[in-house]
Amino acid sequence: MAAFTQAQGARSAPVLSLGTLASATYAASSVIDLGAAIPLDVTLEVECAPSAATTGNRQLILFAKLSLDNTNFGSGPESGASTTNELDLHWIGTLPCNDNTTHRKFFSLQGLPVTRYLKLVVKNDMGVALAFGNVYRADITGASA
């Protein structure tokens, strides 16, 4: 029987720098091209630090916008504060931020529709601006022997 192994690539440079993203606003990455040989999965690492004690929902929310052709992306906000079409985004996960220390959590793209191109969208829903924040990526590949 053939053995199947998975390998995780190195952590990337930030694919999205959140800087001091204001509360109740969105930020989006540039287009991420997963390549013609789409990885088995992609691990995303999200880190942030609130600038003060959090209030309200106390969370950072990670979404994706997908495209098959690098032109027509799913709808939904990429910037600003309007939540009108937020439900059009693909939810990836939520990073709870109950205090103003640095928070870090890992997420997977597994379970989303498979597409070559995507944009990551982050919503600051913690009631205060960020002191800093970044999103990193590492691809998961596989081989059988």
Image (spheres, helix red, strand yellow):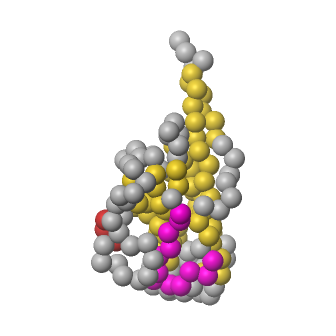
Position of residue 29 measured from the top left corner of the image (x, y, whole percent):
53, 65
Q: Is residue 22 magenta?
A: yes
Q: Main secondary structure of the magenta part?
A: loop
Q: Identify the residue at image location x=39%, y=50%.
A: 69
Q: Is residue 34 left or right of residue 8?
A: left
Residue furthest to the top in view is 1
Q: Let me know if residue 90 appears in the view.
A: no
Position of residue 12 measured from the top left corner of the image (x, y, whole percent):
67, 54
Position of residue 21 measured from the top left corner of the image (x, y, whole percent):
56, 80
Q: Dividing the picture into quarters, in which one does residue 76 lie?
A: bottom left
Instruction: Judge by depth and name the residue closer to the eye, 59 or 129.
Output: 129
Q: Count up the numbered dots.
A: 0
Q: Is residue 67 left or right of residue 106?
A: left
Q: Identify the residue at image location x=58%, y=41%.
A: 140
Q: From the image, which quarter does the C terminus lie in?
A: top right
Q: Is residue 119 magenta?
A: no
Q: Dividing the picture into quarters, in which one does residue 130 lie?
A: bottom right
Position of residue 138 measured from the top left corner of the image (x, y, whole percent):
62, 49
What segment is highlighted magenta in the picture?
Answer: 19-30
Q: Is residue 40 left or right of residue 138?
A: left
Q: Where is 86 relative to 113, above or below?
A: below
Q: Identify the residue at image location x=62%, y=58%.
A: 136
Q: Identify the residue at image location x=65%, y=62%.
A: 14
Instruction: Judge by depth and name the residue closer to the eye, 29 or 111.
Output: 29
